[in-house]
């Protein structure tokens, strides 16, 4: 039977728990992932408590105390024109895919999030179909563009 574990500004992880989650995401995001350092920054933002409207949560689904999936949702501090939450990372263990963990993780994240949720997904990512089944839609049919300023 699966269980959920939540880290946020109230229930912070130990250093070992944090490293385990970051390493899990780094490994199982595969080609859709980021550097461990960036995943760590996202994790830290989700559990911060310095500004009331910011923060978020890290949600883990476990089976027999083994991580099967992780998602990190950050609050945006906005509402209306920008959703109140952004699902930044979600990954299911490569050996557990197709067993419903992603859907359970997403449903629990939707339940926990206060307000609307946005996420970015590559057009060729198979998880796109799950998001659509759960009600996510590409309302604007646009590409996200970013400018990286030189430091």
Image: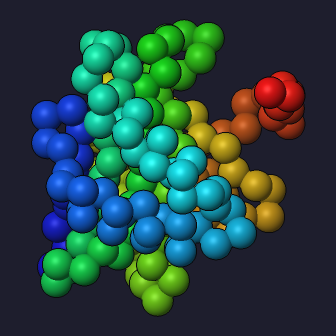
Q: Is residue 86 left or right of residue 139?
A: left
Q: Quadrant of the N terminus?
A: bottom left
Q: What colour scheme was applied to this rendering of the protein?
A: rainbow
User: Where 120 sits versus 36, above or below?
Assistant: above
Q: Quadrant of the C terminus?
A: top right
What's the residue at 18%, 44% (across, down)?
Answer: 12
What's the residue at 20%, 51% (across, down)?
Answer: 13
Q: Quadrant of residue 53?
A: top left
What's the residue at 16%, 83% (across, down)?
Answer: 64
User: Where 130 sits versus 116, above or below?
Assistant: below
List x then y, in percent, for residue 16. 24, 64
* Visible residue check, residue 82: yes
List x then y, in percent, for residue 104. 34, 62
User: Where 87 sits versus 103, above or below?
Assistant: above
List x then y, in percent, for residue 136. 59, 42
Camera-side residue of 15 and 48: 15
List x then y, in percent, for residue 143. 86, 36
User: Where 137 sits versus 80, above or below?
Assistant: below
* Visible residue check, residue 129: no
Extreme bottom residue here? 95
Q: Is residue 125 left or right of residue 78?
A: right
What's the residue at 18%, 55% (across, down)?
Answer: 14
Count of picture labels: 0
Extreme front residue here? 151
Q: Quadrant of residue 74?
A: top left
């Amino acid at each position: 039977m699966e269980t959920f574990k939540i880290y946020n500004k109230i229930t912070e992880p130990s250093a070992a728990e944090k490293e385990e989650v970051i390493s899990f995401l780094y490994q199982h995001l595969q080609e859709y992932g980021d550097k461990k350092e960036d995943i760590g920054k996202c994790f830290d933002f989700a559990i911060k408590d310095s500004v009331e409207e910011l923060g978020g949560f890290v949600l883990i689904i476990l089976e027999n105390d083994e991580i099967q999936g992780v998602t990190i949702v950050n609050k945006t501090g906005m509402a209306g024109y920008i959703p109140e939450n952004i699902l930044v990372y979600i990954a299911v263990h490569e050996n557990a895919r197709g067993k419903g963990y992603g859907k359970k993780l997403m449903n629990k994240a939707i339940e926990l999030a206060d307000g609307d949720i946005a996420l970015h997904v590559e057009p060729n990512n198979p998880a796109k179909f799950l998001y659509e089944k759960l009600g996510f839609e590409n309302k604007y049919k646009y590409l996200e563009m970013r400018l990286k300023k030189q430091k």
